[in-house]
Amino acid sequence: MERRWFPLFGRVVASSSLLLLVYGVTSENVQLKYDENSRQVSFYSATPDDAWLYGHVFETYAGCQGQDIDTAATNCIPEVFSTTLNTNAYKTDCMNVNLSPSKPGIHAGVCLDVGLGLWYGGSELQYQRWPYRDLTLPWQPYVSNDIVPLNMSVGNVLERYWLSSKGVGIFIPETSPVYFKHLRKNNDTNISDELCFLGANDLNIRGFVNKPVTLDILVCKTENILLTHKLMTSEFFPRPVGQPDARMFKSPIWSTWAKFKVDIDQEKVLTYAEEIIEHGFSNSQIEIDDMFSTHYGEFDFSPAKFPKPEHMVATLKRKGFRVTVWVTPFANTDSPSFAEGMVGGYWLTDADGQAPALVKWWQGIGGTLDVENEEAVDWFVSRLEQMKRKYGVDSFKFDAGEVTYVPAFQRHMWAWPDPTRYTTKYVQAVARLGHMIEVRCGYRSQSFPVFVRMGDKESRWGWDNGLRSLVPTVLTMGILGYPYILPDMIGGNGYDYDAADGTNPFTTTELPDRELYIRWLEVTAYLPAMQFSFVPWQYDAEVVRIARKYVQIHEDVVTPIVLREAKEAQETGYPIIRPLWWLAPDDLDALECEDEFVVGDLLLVAPVVECGARTRNVYLPPGVWEDEGSGETVQGGLWLREYSVPLDHVPTFRLIKHV
């Protein structure tokens, strides 16, 4: 059969042998053509020969898993293709592509070749690069996950948004359930990258629901990445309504977690606070983490570990600390709150609504707060408010909230096309407790004026959730619409997997490498907030000196810029920490740079993230820059080779004139 392309300028009917109906409306800058034989799609602006995004449409039967789809197993691929493809214009620069299976038990999807250009966005990842490099993720529901135990999954913070250096953007609305994979193929002849989307959720894939699912994908195109990003985020992301607590931006949070893990008590907390003061450090608050309560799920203090909690909190406040504590949406089955929640119907129940749908999380088995139940949320929040009144604590660090810890079979599973609704509703619920809170998950929750903390980072140098991944994670969270980023603890979490010896590795501790700790501290000083747990005086006097220096830089130099940009974020949704391409969207060096960033539009930071490095190459985008270290004026659009970076130095450059 002769190959025929169909520019979508209205209704076109493909070959009847394929039973494929194609309806099309083009936008001004986005057009599409379709080959009914190969089912290839191609997006272009002027002529098909100048296409900037390619892909292919496919079908699969319900009940087929990812491996079966990839291998085109005969029992998974329908013999007759029957999906309807529709398009409609979405303003000038975007097109909505709609894939609708016409038969029950069949799901439709598309794989897009992202080999043209550099790609960003999606989600927080265990292996985080900027842009994507060497990334392969298997078929999975596109839902929020805890990336520490699930290191091949999409992460704690995610959006259905991807962005290309070619000015191409992809967005999938939350009304479409999505299965996803990112596949990098590398063979002797070529390397290719594919983003694949299947209109299905876990219930569809498992064959529990056979109703056809429509997959909507919006594709946008402008002249460069920055214009596309500004267009799409203004259309599809909510903006923050307010901003978090100003003191949390300015001065460090001191957490007990990484240093003590679960081995905390009243004496250790008071000693920790006294040491912070004695070494001359400021604070925004001290955070009392895991295992302070009588049971998981109780908002109290264990009398065995904290005999006088009210006195402890009052003492900390006299010393200038505010006090926060760690909270999860779980209550273990041995807790009084679990029993109370069962009576009230406050936990997620099984699919029949008869019994709590228990979840195994990292500290036990218990019930999970039903965030769709307003009475349950009121109960949860009122108990936390009561804790504040009783003990004098100021606020809370909220953990979990990802779909990882939502039981697969629970009462809302039929009503939620996208299970990550749990994440959105959880953040909405806890945000009622004020601007001092922090969460570690995010999805469609950009409007809440709270800090969003990174998932736990490992105490190592690499891209595999170590120091090198820190800047790419910040940049990714920023373009996903989350400007109020709380970096994880300086030096990482110090998990000692070898010492765990088969037990819970999250209860063991290994002090991070000294140089790693210093370089981590230096990066964090230029981010929206700082968070210590391991303390500088666990090393030596030089580390204490360097830490004091960078806390002062953060408070005196960085915070004024951050607070100004936080105000702008409420109006625009722009990130506070920006990639170099924000200043030079057509500059390949800026587009490829993953170890530098700009605070607002003013201060370029080039931290050291390589072990043993005492020089580094620094790229300055076009413009006139002032070297903050030497005071020299430098013309941008060039590399500064072998720039000296002693252990206590971070290259920074202030923009004098933007070109």
Image (cartoon, rainbow, N blue to C red):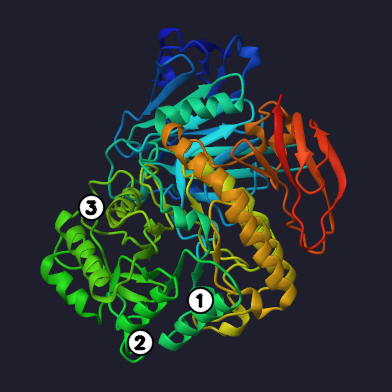
Q: Specify the farthest residue to the right.
A: 642
Q: Quadrant of the C terminus?
A: top right
Give the foreground label among 1 and 2: 2
Q: Is residue 355 left or right of residue 510?
A: left
State the CA–CA distance, disc 1 to disc 2.
Answer: 22 Å
State the CA–CA distance, disc 3 to disc 2.
Answer: 39 Å
Give the foreground label among 3 and 2: 2
Q: Is residue 33 visible?
A: yes
Point out residue 516 in the picture as x, y percentages from the top left corner: 71, 67
Q: Is residue 148 left or right of residue 657?
A: left
Q: Residue visible at 61% across and 23% down?
A: 224
Q: Residue visible at 28% across and 76% down?
A: 391
User: Taking 289 as reference, is 659 above or below it?
Assistant: above
**Which mark is drawn over residue 306?**
2
Number of other residues with Cα within 10 Å of mark 2, as a class: few under 14, some 14 to 19, many 20 or more? many
**Which mark is drawn over residue 204?**
none
Number of other residues with Cα within 10 Å of mark 3, as a class: few under 14, some 14 to 19, many 20 or more? some
Which badge, 1 or 3, comes first in the chain's sequence? 3
Point out residue 362 in the picture as x, y percentages from the top left corner: 42, 73
Which badge, 1 or 2, comes first in the chain's sequence? 2
Point out residue 400 in the picture as x, y percentages from the top left corner: 39, 62
According to the image, label 3 marks what residue? 412
Point out residue 640 in the picture as x, y percentages from the top left corner: 85, 41
Q: Amino acid at mark 2?
A: Phe
**Which mark is drawn over residue 506?**
1
- Tell whether label 2 touches label 3 (CB within 8 Å): no
- Tell whether label 2 touches label 1 (CB within 8 Å): no
Q: Amino acid at mark 1?
A: Phe
User: Taking 283 as reference, is 194 above or below it?
Assistant: above
